[in-house]
Every structure is written in C-alpha cells, then in structure tokens.
Image (cartoon, helix red, strand yellow):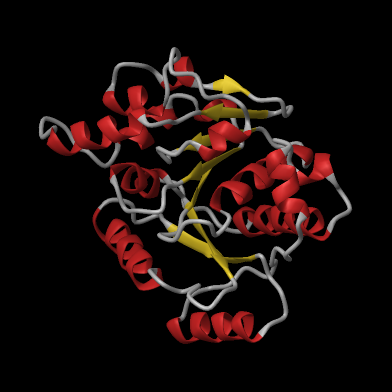
Amino acid sequence: MINIAVINLKGGVGKSVTTCNLAAQLAAEQYSVLVVDVDKQGNTSKFFKRCDYEQPSLAEVLLGSAWASDAIVDTSLPCVDLLPADMRMLKANRNILMDVTEPQQYRLRDALRKVAANYCYCLMDCPPDLDMGSINALCAADWVIIPVDCDEWACDGMAEILDQIARVQMYYNPHLKILGVLLTKYRNTKYADGVITHLAQMGVPLLHTAIRYTVRVSEAKSAHLPLRAYKQNCTAALDYADLAREIIEKVSTADTREE
C-alpha cells in the first residue's frame, strides 16, 4: 500500500477536496483506496456521509481501543473505503501527547500496516495544524502532497511545513518524500505567477498538474459527489484525472517503502 499524506497549514486550500477526488480517480483507474480522515473537523468523513459517533473512528484507533479494521467503513464509491474522524480527535491528540509509555509518532503507521494488504493506495487528509495526527500521518506516509491555492498569501506556512517534513525524515521516517505542491483553484493571474515563482525560489517541487478553478468544485462538494460523478467533463474533473495518472506514474518509478 502506497501511503500519501495531503497536508497544508492553511485551511481552505483544497486538502479534503483533493483527497476525495483523487481517491475517486484512483479507483476509476482500478486501484483500491483507503481514505484516512486525520482532521478533527471531519470534512472528508462528512463528504462521504460517514460521521457516526456511535461507531469507532480514527481517534479510537490511535488510542488503541479499536483496530483499524473495526473502524474502516465503505463509501458510496466502489473500491474506496474510509477511516473516519470527528471531534473525538481532540481528546486523542491530547491523550497521545500525555502518554509516555510508548512511541507517539508511529501509532497510525502501525495501525495501517495491519490493513495494508487490502489496498493499493492510502490517502491521509491532514488537519491545518501540526498536531499528533499530522505527525502520525507524516510518519506513516511514503509521499506528501501539499495543496496550495493560488492567492496572495498562498505560501504562508510553507517554510514550517517543509521544516516539519525535514524533521520527520531525519528522526522518524527517512523514506518520506515530497511528491509535490499541487496548485488548486488555479487561474492565470499575477498571484498564480507569484506563487509559482516563490515556490521555485524555495526549491519546492511542483506537480505538473494544476487544478483549475471552477464553481463545479463547490457544487460537487455540496452534492457529496466526486467531480467525475457530478460533472466529469468540467475542467477540475479532467485535472484530477490527470493528477491521478501523474501520481501513478511517479510512484511507479520510485520505492520509498522500508526493506
């Protein structure tokens, strides 16, 4: 199973939208996908209509009171399953920080290993902060995608993300690699040009695919449908299809997994 963390310290940049649509496109390419919602806001879980406080969630998995296989649920998409999250992650993050009896950073990695044989890809939708959920996702990941929307303050927090990734690579997960920055809500404006220039100056790799701006993204999210099901010929749907193919090609030519 290839693990990909989708992370940015800014909210509203398209992390959850990217996770859900990329999962749908990978499934359309005949790959089985596990989506892990790491964000206490649970936007990805809400998208799939799988928020249920009566059932175990990622919080219980991280705290050791449930197996990942017990918390994983199916979605309306063939070949896509979900490990949901909700506000219970607040307690989980706090309790993990206070627990000094075992390593804090590898809980998600160890949990996912038990279900890895069931999936080709795992996409982890991270919160817009560096809490224990995010750290666990980076420690479990082979690759990182950083969605960036093309506005005036797009690169805010980028240095902090890169620093945290470097620290995780140094101390916990030397196999972790940056797949690239994904430009979202892309329009040919001076802000977009400035973002690209700034990223180049920082030495951050840029994915070839950019997700063009269209109102269909918001409409599809409100309809709880991936773009390929809502409006498969809209620009963003075509872009996410290209993104899936780009990622498949990139990961097929490199192996970051442990020996």
Place of residue 219 in the rendered image (x, y in percent of width and height, measured from the top left): 75, 47
Q: Quadrant of residue 253?
A: bottom right
Q: Is residue 132 above or below residue 47?
A: below
For the point 65% across and 56% down, which residue is it?
247
Q: Is residue 28 above or below residue 246?
A: above
Decide which of 170, 37 is in the foreground and name it. 37
Q: Is residue 61 above or below residue 256?
A: above
Decide which of 151, 105 is in the foreground and name it. 151
Place of residue 20 in the rendered image (x, y in percent of width and height, measured from the top left): 64, 42
For the point 89% across and 53% down, which residue is it?
233
Name the quadrant of the C terminus: top left
Residue furthest right in the image: 233
Residue 259 seen from this side: no
Q: How many numbered tags mark residues here?
A: 0
Place of residue 134 in the rendered image (x, y in percent of width and height, measured from the top left): 36, 47
Q: Is residue 62 above or below residue 169?
A: above
Residue 222 seen from this side: yes
49 to the left or right of 220: left
Place of residue 248 in the rendered image (x, y in percent of width and height, measured from the top left): 68, 52
Decide which of 234, 165 is in the foreground and name it. 234
Decide which of 189, 256 is in the foreground and name it. 189
Name the quadrant of the N terminus: top right
For the point 17% across and 39% down, which residue is it?
97
